[in-house]
Structure formats: C-alpha cells, structure tokens
Amino acid sequence: MRWSSAVRSRPAALTTAILAVLLLTAPSAEDKRVSIYTASAAYSLPVVDRDGQQYVSLLEALEPLGKLNARLDGNTWKLRFNQIDAEFKPGKNEGRVRGAKVRMEGPLFFENNRGLIPLASLPTLLARFLNVEVKSHPAARRLFVGNVATHFRSEVRNDALVVTFTAPVNPVISTEPGKLRMTFLREPVISDNEVIKFDGAPASSLSYVESNGRAELTVTGSVPLMATFANGGRTIRVAAAPGPAAQVTAPTFPAVAPAAQQPVPELQPGSPVAVLPSPPSTTTFPSPPAYLVVLDASHGGEERGAALAADLAEKDVTLALARQLRNELQQRGIATMMLRDGDLTLTAEQRAAMTSSAHPALFISIHAGSSGPAVRIFTAMLESSDAIPAAFLRWDSAQSAFTSASRVAAGEVQKRLAAKDVPSQVLSAAIRPLNNIAAAAFAIEVGPPKAKPESLLAADYQQQLASAVATAVINLRPRIAEAR
Amino acid sequence: MSGRALKIAFAIMLAAVIGTGGYVFVLKQKEEEQARRIAYTQPVSPPAAGPVERVPLYIAYDFEGVLRPRDVQMALPGEPSQRARAVLHALLTEYTGDPSPHKLAPGADVRAVFLVSDNLAVVDTNATFADGHRSGVFVETLTVASVVKTLAANLPGVRRVKILVEGKERETLAGHADLMTFYDVGRIDELMTQLE
C-alpha cells in the first residue's frame, strides 16, 4: 500500500517540480527597487539578489547626494564622499566609514567596478556618511533621509474627497471603474492608516499601501472618479467624473489667439498625441516652474548606449554629466528635472511623456561618444513649422513647432562652449525622443577631450561643459520666455 | 478517475510538454541556422548586366566629420530597384573594407531596395548592418545620411527613404539614429550643409 501511495504521488510531485522550475526561471513581472528620499533628491535604484539577500550599489546610492570618488586599491575598495573617507573589502562583512568600523548584514560584492552592499545595511551606511537619521520602511524598500516625509490629511467636502499634502506632489494617476489610484514614485508620502472610511459621496474609502519603493493611494467610490490638482500640487480633489455632455472643453494652448482660430493638424488614426497645457479655467494642474529645464541622461538600465571603453558605458557618462549640469543650473537658480537619476531603463516614449507632462521651457538630452574631441549639438531633423502650436500636436512631429527656438538654444550653447575653448558643431539628427518634445529641445553628444574615452569622466572636463551649457541656459531665458 | 488513469494522464501531459519544448527548440535552431546561412550567402557583388556608368556615392569620413561625393565607374542593372541595391552595395563596400573612412562591420549589406511610390524608397538592410554598427549619434547619423543621399543622387525622383533591418522596422540603428522615421532628402541636404 505504501509503495502504491508513493507511486501515485510521484506524477504530482514531478508536475509540481516542473511548475516550480518554470516559475523560478520566468522573468519577474517587476524589477525590485529601493527608493531613497532626501531633502535634495528623490531617486530609485535597482535591487539585486545575491546569496539570498537583497543588495544595492553603494555608489549609486551616494552619487546623487554629493561628490564621490571610488577606486580599488589592491583588495580594498576606497571611497571618498564629500571629504568623508570609507573603505570596504570585497567578501567581508565589515567596512570603515569616517574611520569607524561598520558591520554589514552580509559581505560586500564587487562587480563591474561597483560595490554591492546588503540593502538591510544601507540605512546604517547612509546615516554614517550623511550624519543624519535615516528611517527605513524595509518591507516597502523606502528610505527617508532626515525629516523628509510628506504626510496628508483627507476630508469629504462639497461632494469631493480633498486630500491635502504637506508638500507638493505629482503622482501618476490611473483610474478604473469606481477606483482612482495615485502612485507616488518620487514623493516620500507616508501614512499611519491603511484604510480611511468615509460616509459621504463620492468616495467610500481611501487606502494606502507602499511596496517596491513607492506609495499608492487608492480612492474607492461608487461612480467614475477624476482628480484635479490645486494649491501648487499640495491638494488633490477627487470628485465624480462629469458625464459625456460636460466633457466638451478641449484643452487649448495658452496662446494669444483663440483655439477656434487655430489650425488643428490632421491626426492619423491611432497616432498618439502630445497634449499641451490646458487652460487653468477648466482644470487646475500643479503649475510648473516658469523656466524649467528637463535633463535627459540618455540610455540607462539595460540599455547601456555606446561602449566607450571596455568598462565604460555611455549611460554612466551621461548620468554623471547630467548631474553635474543639474548642480550648475541649481546654483544659478534654475529649476531642473532629471528624467533619470539612477540606473533606470526608460523608453523614448516614457522620456517624451515625462517631459511633456512637466511642461518645460527647455529639454536637454545628453549623449556621449568615443569620437572626439568635438562636442556636437543636435536639433531635430524636422522641417520648421511657423504655425502656432495647436491644442494637439502629432506625436512624431511635436517638435516641428519649436525647431526655431531649439536652433537658437543650440546656437547659444555653441557660443558658450567656444568661450571656454571647446570646439562644437550644431547639426540636425533624427534621434529619439527629440521629435516628440513640445518645447525647445536639443541633444548634446560629448566626445573625450583626450584620446582616452575615460577622460569623459574627468571632473574638470565635465565641469567645463556643464558650466558652458548652464550659462547658455541662463542667457536663453528671456528669449525662450518670450517665445512661450 | 482511477489512480492508473491519473498516472497515464500525467504521463501524456508531461510527454506533451517535453515534446513541445523540444520541437520549439529545434525550430529555433533551424531558424537561427537559416538566418546564418542567409547572412553568409549574400552575393559578394550584385549581378550587373548593363553598361558601365558613372555612379556618385556620398562617402562619410569620420575623421573630418563630413560627407563627400565621389564618382565610381560600375556596371548597373537596368531595373531601378536592382540598380539602387547595386549602388548601395558599392557604397557599403567602401565602408566594410580596410582601411575604411567610416568603418562598418564586415558583411554589412543591403538586401533589397523597394521603390514604393514616385518618391519613396525603402531600403532593407541585413542584420549585420545594424547589429554590427558602432553606437553614437554622430556615427549613426553619418551612415544614414550617406545611404539616403547616395540613393537620392542615383534615383533623382526619390525624396523620402525608410530603412528596414531584415525586412522589419527597428527603433534605432545602434541606439541613436531613429529608424522608425522616414528620412527626407531635403533634411539630409541641410545636414550636409551643416557638416561643411
């Protein structure tokens, strides 16, 4: 009898084993990420598994927060972060930060010139480096450096659920029948309550969850819901969506002429469109800064870009340069937004959509090449259109209404580079996502100043380029503002 | 259902899963082998059956960062699509040789050129052309400009060019130059002026 039972269970066990193997080898639906929120930056990093533990790159965790140099000296990985020295040994659980011993939850892995540390030890290490308290939500992989958390309160007022935040927010909003979901990718939104119930219409509850480096608020109601922003992004009002008869107001470009007089370009069936800002009279969106510059560090994540040297990928150079440019612009009081501030994979469509929703004055895409020493500045390879931008622009030629402004911007950058003895050339090229950007836009491809591609990472060269571009951005401000 | 029947059902399902997996694997191998064979059996030079003619090629020079015309003498077939392919083959041969003014991977070639309408040409390149291409905005733009300009110079009616890879659309040539777009000859002329 025992033998019979064993035989009977064998096929089931075999099937289970096959299913387990299939499940284990299947690609995960979503990559693991950790989000780090600080007073100066909010960013997200990929998390990898090593020896059954979650690991993260210490370099990428520190890079957005200050000046960082790292090198392998024999068997010791030495770091210098904002005048703070640290050292770790690959394979060892211990390291030193500010001369004091730090014990980690697992050994340091050294891969591709980067030290991977256990995610569980990241709060301790960040606290040591930054000398501030770091709070961790380990299950959700969210780290709060200092007192940065954004809280909210909610109340039903005038047939709407009004959620008020302690700082401006810009969540991704999605809806499904009876539900409206707000996903906070960059904001340190936290809540002590998982579910808040309401008696009044239109919302019956507001639930809060956090996972994989982000927070999510879901409003549940009995009718289709829509969200509007107010108070500079600090307030989100969720109300019943208007019926079809009420949805007749088409968004119009805030230009001098009325929308009815604007020629609307023909849209091809299925063509996605770039939506321009809608007037504040119909819906209130968080108003973007008057002169916002979007910085696009090209490539990232799985897309490495050009292999500039055996161990130097274009994606790393573009990120370093974008950060340098951000610092230069911020020092000059210019608002900036980086499309990626870590090793993220973003499609051209995602970059264009993120840019369009930020309504920038200027978009700068950063590339790096191994052919040098020239810097090349590219504008879209599109025919210039003199028409005033209409309510909707064709996705694949949204830039054509802005090519004149883009060429002016590229010319100014060339002038500022020449002032710093950096030769450059302004050219046109069909590179994504320039064609889809509804703002003045250019791409810059930097070549190495010396024969060695590694010289692209030289701090003085990057500073020289970033300073020239930042000066150009300042000089362009009145002209772009006038054109807008 | 009895235990024996269950066992048989499991065995059949398992055999089906393993069999299907094996079949898919064999199909994939065959497909890859066929692709390899196609890549290696590209003619070294296209068949030419016409009088020798002067053919302008627009050659990219990486070092100077320019595109310059150069005339070559070659026999061309009479049929316009084959002519176009022969011209582009000659252009890419300039790049795949050693030394090369604008290095392309050995084996990079044009599979076919389709003259779709009065002014639109579709160039179908092989996988090596794109897979082996160096990555960079400038180098990729030079390649595209060279192909488009050479085609337009030899087929004067052509005003727009679309580039495919192995018969399919591809997002970019090697991470930068947009291959989803239709290249306008007028815009390439502008680029040539900028390069001078």
Image (cartoon, coloured by chain):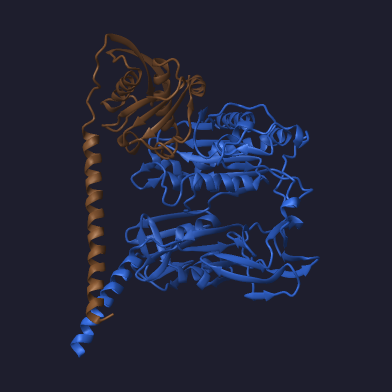
> Where is residue A263 drawn, in percent x and y?
70, 31
Image point 30% across, 23% down: which residue? B89
Q: Say which quarter of the image contains residue A234.
A: bottom right
Q: Nearer the viewer, residue A242 or B163?
A: A242
> Where is residue A300 drawn, in percent x and y?
46, 49
Image quadrant where one finds the N terminus of chain A = bottom left
Chain B is which colour?
brown
> Where is residue B113 drawn, in percent x and y?
36, 25
Q: Residue furthest bottom?
A: A1
Residue A377 seen in this snapshot:
yes
Count all numbered tags in the image, as a single digit: 0
Residue A326 seen in this snapshot:
no
Tell me if A57 is positioned left or right of A439 in this view: left
Image quadrant where one finds the C terminus of chain A = top right
- Residue A176, compared with residue A401, is above or below; it is below
Q: Residue furthest right?
A: A158
Q: Say which quarter of the image contains residue B174.
A: top left
Q: Residue furthest front?
A: B1
> Where is residue A398 drawn, in percent x and y?
60, 36
Chain A is which colour?
blue
- Residue A403, compared with residue A156, is above or below; it is above
Tell me if A74 is positioned left or right of B47 in this view: right
